[in-house]
Amino acid sequence: IQNFEFLTLITQDVKKLAGNKPFYCAAEYIPEDPIITVAKNGPMDGLWHEKFYTTIKDILIMNDDNNRVSLDQLKLVIDGRLQGYSSIQNLVNYLSNHDHNRFCYDIFTHIKDEQTAINRLKLGKK
């Protein structure tokens, strides 16, 4: 929804209903932009970190050593402040959601060696 006024009202109402309980409002905002976060005067506490998902997925399913993601790219997605976010609290890092194939499916589709796929699922490489 590209209507910050509406999102602000919804966020305020939900937090009011939550009362004293902590409640975190995360947006699925595409393209990803820190401007939607409260820290940047936006309506939401944070947003789903799509760049984290795509970068980590690319790192873990690559078969060709010549196509590896650089350490700088990895640092960029791990520390959201390098992408303009005020804090890592403004991001929800994820490896799976309802919009994408399951991570297991992608790993086993792209990596034919079962043991390598299992190792990558454990977020480690041989």
Image (cartoon, rainbow, N blue to C red):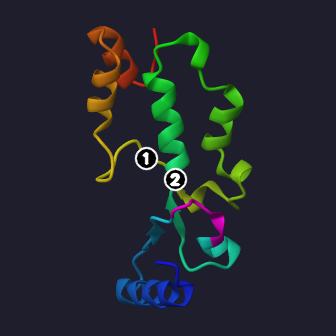
Q: Looking at the image, is mark 1 or mark 2 earlier in the sequence?
A: 2
Give the residue displayed 31% in from the left and 17% down from the top: 118
* Numbered label attached to residue 94: 1
Quadrant of the image for the C terminus?
Answer: top left
- Is residue 57 highlighted in magenta? no
Quick check: is 33 in the magenta stretch? yes
Mark 2 residue type: His
User: Which amino acid does the dot numbered 1 rest on?
Assistant: Tyr
For the question of whether residue 74 can be seen, the reply is yes
Residue 108 picture location, percent across and down: 28, 22
Q: Which residue does the image show at 56% across and 80% down from the upper left?
A: 43
Give the answer, above or below, for where 107 lies relative to 48.
Answer: above
Q: Is residue 70 above or below residue 81?
A: above
Give the residue pinned by disc 2. Answer: 49
Image height of 80 relative to 67, above or below: below
Residue 31 in which image quadrant: bottom right
Side (left or right) of 28 relative to 106: right
Magenta stretch bounds: 30-35
Apparent side of residue 82 relative to residue 123 in the rendered image (left or right): right
Main secondary-structure element of the magenta-colored stretch: loop
Q: CA distance from mark 1 to mark 2?
A: 7 Å
Q: Regarding mark 2 in the picture, which secondary structure is present there? A: loop
Badge 1, how many Cα within 10 Å: few under 14, some, many 20+? some
Label 1: which secondary element: loop
Judge the density around disc 2: few (<14), some (14-19), many (≥20) Cα neighbours within 10 Å.
many
Query: Which residue is at 54% across, 66% downward?
Result: 46
Tag 1–tag 2 contact (CB < 8 Å): yes
